[in-house]
Image: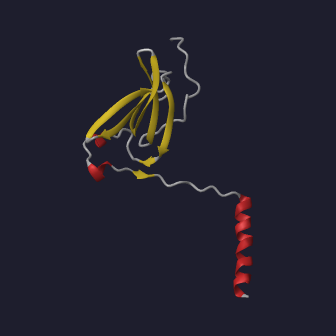
Amino acid sequence: MSTLATPTELPFEPVNIGDTVRVHQKVIEGTKERIQVFEGTVIAKHLKTDISATFTVRKVSLGVGVERIFPVYSPNIAKVEILKHNKVRRAKLFYLRNAIGKKYRLKEKAKKVITTESTRNQAVEATPATEVQSAE
């Protein structure tokens, strides 16, 4: 058995397959350091629980597909923004490499609405009061 440290916390919110993300990566050019942004769709994740875990992001730039593989635990990743969650039925979206135009689109996940007991009771109580006002 090896004594490698296992990661306990992700440095950012976990990304899923099909998410549209914006990855902010630190780039060192000579003596200067800047942040470079790469926005695209997550098409694959590799070794989800390992220290060498990665995720692949794909975008189409000027009609050419560009893919980049980002290590999850890299100190060079400054931030990962999740722009939207898409509904997918595959673990790997490699079919997007051959998709053009409308076939490249993914359906967005429906947002869940959470209601609490207090808001549910207020809605029930408000309904008869509005009916009485409208009847008068």
Q: Nearer the viewer, residue 35 or 41?
A: 35
Q: Residue at x 33, y 33 (%)?
A: 67
Q: Is residue 69 left or right of residue 4?
A: left
Q: How many marks?
A: 0
Residue 126 x/y as whole percent? 73, 72
Residue 15 x/y as whole percent? 48, 37
Residue 11 x/y as whole percent? 55, 28
Q: Which quarter of the rendered picture does the C terminus lie within?
A: bottom right
The image's colouring method is: secondary structure
Q: Nearer the viewer, residue 60 or 121?
A: 60
**Residue furthest to the bottom:** 136
Q: Residue at x 66, y 58 (%)?
A: 115
Q: Is residue 56 left or right of residue 73?
A: left
Q: Residue at x 70, y 74 (%)?
A: 127
Residue 103 x/y as whole percent? 29, 51
In the image, is residue 76 above or below residue 134? above
Q: Residue at x 45, y 39 (%)?
A: 21
In the image, is residue 61 above or below residue 121? above
